[in-house]
Image (cartoon, rainbow, N blue to C red):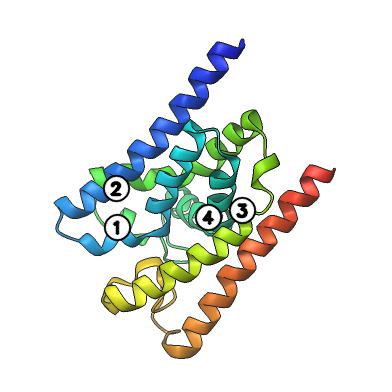
Amino acid sequence: MNKNKKSIVIDFIGFLLFALGISAITNSLFIENPYQIFWSCYLGLIIIGIGVVKRNSFLIMSQIYILAIPILIWDIDFLYHFILGKPLLGITDYFFREEGLNIGKIISLQHLFVIPLSIYALGKIGIKKGKDAWKMSLIQISVIFLTVIFLTPPEQNINCVFAMCGSSDFSGIAYRITWFGIFFGTVLLTKFLIGKLLKE
């Protein structure tokens, strides 16, 4: 693939992810559920899309650190339910409650490819400027947490902040502290794993 074609492919990935993020927010407003715009994956799509188009590895890495492990868990839960026809963790049960596809479900399928596409684009762009992106990740998680806590109702459970997604048995202050710790931990773990892979 020549340089021009590579650039076109990278631009396509960037515009695709950005468009999906905007579509997700637009659909949330259309179905009169504006709280959904605070889902981290929606914001992540937009930031990754901008990062890919701008060839900014810092922006891309900051979102990969946040989203890689949570999306992997979503994918496992989805594929288990899709293949075996029964829930595993209950995270993706919403997808299977009604037959057929709608815009919301189509947008949700981005969980299956956003990280692979991001990593592919990152491989073409390079990551020299993305080494400290984990710091932005931690700040972003903190801002998202506070925004969701203060601006969204608990029953929406955006980003699983108020209770464990798929289960309401674990909630309250103890859960929120645990949520914070887990997300900080996943950022640092993803950073460690990517760093180790790059060294090898």
Give the percent coordinates (x, y) of residue 152. 27, 73
First reached walking from the N terminus: tag 3 or tag 1: 1
Give the numbered dot on residue 67. Answer: 4
Q: Quick check: 121 left or right of 171?
A: right
- On the image, numbered disc 1 is attached to which residue? 37
Q: Which residue is mark 2?
A: 24
Q: Sequence order check: which comes first, mark 2 or mark 4?
A: 2
Using the image as rendered, state which of residue 177 and residue 95 is in the foreground: 177
Q: Count of labels shown? A: 4
- Distance Cα–Cα, label 3 vs label 1: 23 Å
State the image quarter where residue 6 is shown: top right
Discs 2, 3 touching: Cβ within 8 Å: no
Relative to 57, 141 lies left or right: left
Residue at which label 3 appears: 133
Which SS class for mark 3? helix
Image position of 129 (left or right of 45):
right
Residue at 49% from the left image edge and 66% from the top image edge: 141
